[in-house]
Image (tube, rainbow, N blue to C red):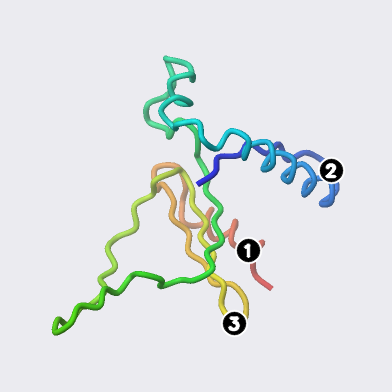
Amino acid sequence: MQCLRIMVAEESFEELVQQVQAVVVASLANQDVPFESIVSKLKKDRDMSRHPLVQLAFVVHSQHDLGRLVLLDGVETKSLEGPATSRFDLEFHFYQKPDGLQGDVVFSTDLYAPETIENMLGVFSN
């Protein structure tokens, strides 16, 4: 995962894309810096109830079920879905399908009401 800080302001979509491109290219120059090194440089009095770098994840996966089912010779296996646990405050996961995108949202119920998430998802519907 690559952590990026993107400041969304009143700019055109093209300007936003250019900003994201510049941030991504710049972040690749530092991709070998260990995570622990970055976290240690943060304020010592940071809020321990929050992830040190990421509060929101927006992920587009190329495949949905890749690697979920383990095939073992002579053994019948079944994939079980457990309750989703949020690693961050809010996670959007989208999966490429032949007819478009399918998605999941994982969120902290301490921070968001289901109705709030439904409203957010409204921007993704046709």
> Do the residues under discs 3 and 1 have CB atoms within 8 angstroms?
no
Out of 32 and 60, give the one closest to the viewer: 32
State left or right for residue 12 relative to residue 83.
right
| Residue at the left extreme of this rendering | 74
Query: At label 1, which amino acid type do we have?
Result: Gly
Give the mark, 2 or 1, whose residue is nearer the N terminus: 2
Task: Write down the quadrant of residue 30 in the picture.
Answer: top right
Query: At label 2, which amino acid type do we have?
Result: Glu
Secondary structure at numbered mark 3: loop
State left or right for residue 29 relative to residue 115.
right
Quadrant containing the C terminus is: bottom right
Out of 102 and 111, give the one closest to the viewer: 102
Q: Which mark is residue 11?
A: 2
- Which residue is pictured at 52% across the width and 64% down the height? 61
The residue that disc 3 covers is 98
- Which residue is pictured at 25% across the width and 71% down the height? 80
> Do the residues under discs 2 and 3 have CB atoms within 8 angstroms?
no
Task: Write down the quadrant of residue 75 in the picture.
Answer: bottom left
Q: Residue 75 carries which label?
A: none
Q: Residue 122 carries which label?
A: 1
- What separation in Å lies between label 2 and label 1 (alpha carbons)? 22 Å
Secondary structure at numbered mark 1: helix
Please identify, in this view, whether the residue under mark 3 or under mark 1 is nearer the observer.
Answer: 3
Is the residue marked by circle 1 packed among few (<14), some (14-19), or many (20+) residues within 10 Å? few
- What separation in Å lies between label 3 and label 1 (alpha carbons)? 22 Å
